[in-house]
Amino acid sequence: MKRFIGLLAALAVLGGISGCSEQSALSPAGEDADRIALLSWIMFSGATLILLIVAGALVIAIRGPASMRRFLAGETMIRLGGVVVPVLTLSLLLGYGLYLMRERITALEPAVLRISVTGEQWWWRVGYLRDGAAPVSEANEIRIPVGREIDFVLRASDVIHSFWVPSLGGKLDMIPGRTNTLRLKAARPGIYRGQCAEYCGGPHALMALEIIAMPQAEFDAWLAAAERRNDPADAKAARGQKLFLSTGCGSCHAIRGTPATGVVGPDLSRIGERRLLAAATLSNTAENLAGLIRDPQAAKAGMLMPPFAIFSGEDMDALTAYLGSLR
Ligand code: HEC
Ligand SMILES: [Cu+2]
């Protein structure tokens, strides 16, 4: 009994956690997620009803009067409960599931925006695709206009990953050599957390992302600002930039408008405005930034960045001031 109560308490705590966070299929904020949540609740209620009926039948079979027990053990009951009811229930559920997904099956009109997302061990490469211009590179944090159809063009560069933002819709695998497209729409402005949903090696659990849904005008202004030159504003930031460019960061990271054009790691052109670091696992503070650069393994065990213990305190200050200023 004690164990049972312990289990119930653990489930209640888990339920509480998943219900409150912004990463939950039970707090939908998009049409796809609405449908998934509805189907989940229908299946949950149906399964609960069936469980209660079966448990009731079990009690009667053990304790009930002889006539009822005979009826339960009869062939009619077995045909009905063992064949007819399951076939009916599952057929209805399948039909309803296909009906719910009907818009997914028929072709949709072109999306207003296409964003490529590539799964990397263990972060997300992001590109805002534009007609007749190179994509705008980003990483780990995706901004979208609220209420618009957006196609996420999903790829993987190393192993299989899976793109999943539960509040916006279902998950879709990212498979090396293939391109999968997932259409999502955020119904309300907000920050929706996502998570890689296919085990992809060591820090797989530390491969998260955030989608920030904002009004269209705000989004347009933000995307247009990507073209702006991001020169160091003061002497400290200038020194930080010099350090960034002279210590080899640019062989793996790109910052628009500088000679740093590396593509091995995340694009850092706007790292200063991101809410989180290292694939949404650390809050974006100067302290965390310094820790990540000095000792990446302590910040996120397994991450594919070498340690840089070469900077003095003053140098690190300048470097983090520069990175923090990139917006
Ligand atoms: C050998 C390639 C390589 C070099 C050199 C390198 N990095 Fe990285 N860096 C990475 C990779 C890969 C990641 C992403 C790891 C992850 O999140 O799993 C990363 C992540 C980061 C992040 C977090 C980015 C984000 O989107 O949250 C910052 C900041 C960063 N590096 C700064 C630097 C700085 C500063 C230097 C130079 C002192 C540097 N890196 C040198 C490969 C490199
Ligand atoms: Cu993964």
Image: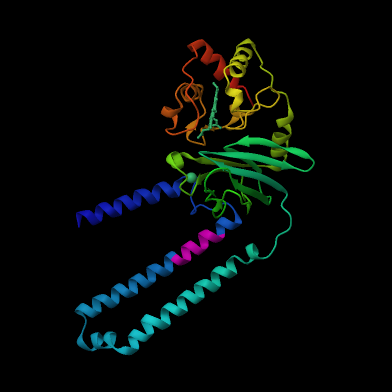
Determine if the magenta segment contains residue 36.
Answer: yes
Quadrant of the drawing holding the C terminus: top right
Task: Using the rendered image of the protein, determine whether residue 324 is visible from the camera's viewpoint.
Answer: no
Vertical comparison of 67 with 269: above or below: below
Vertical comparison of 96 with 123: above or below: below
Residue 258 at what x, y percent from top left? 69, 22
Residue 139 at what x, y percent from top left? 60, 36
Vertical comparison of 226 with 96: above or below: above
Q: Which residues are magenta?
A: 35-43
User: Which picture quadrant has residue 252?
Assistant: top right
Vertical comparison of 184 with 38: above or below: above
Task: Using the rendered image of the protein, determine whether residue 11 is visible from the camera's viewpoint.
Answer: yes
Q: Is residue 183 left or right of residue 275?
A: right
Residue at 66 percent of width and 46 percent of height: 146
Quadrant of the drawing holding the N terminus: bottom left
**How was the colour assigned to the protein in this rendering?**
rainbow
Residue at 52 percent of width and 46 percent of height: 159
- The overriding secondary structure of the stretch rendered in magenta is helix
Q: Nearer the viewer, residue 137 or 324?
A: 137
Number of marks present in the image shown: 0
Determine if the magenta segment contains residue 20.
Answer: no
Residue 273 at what x, y percent from top left? 60, 29
User: Which picture quadrant has residue 81?
Assistant: bottom left
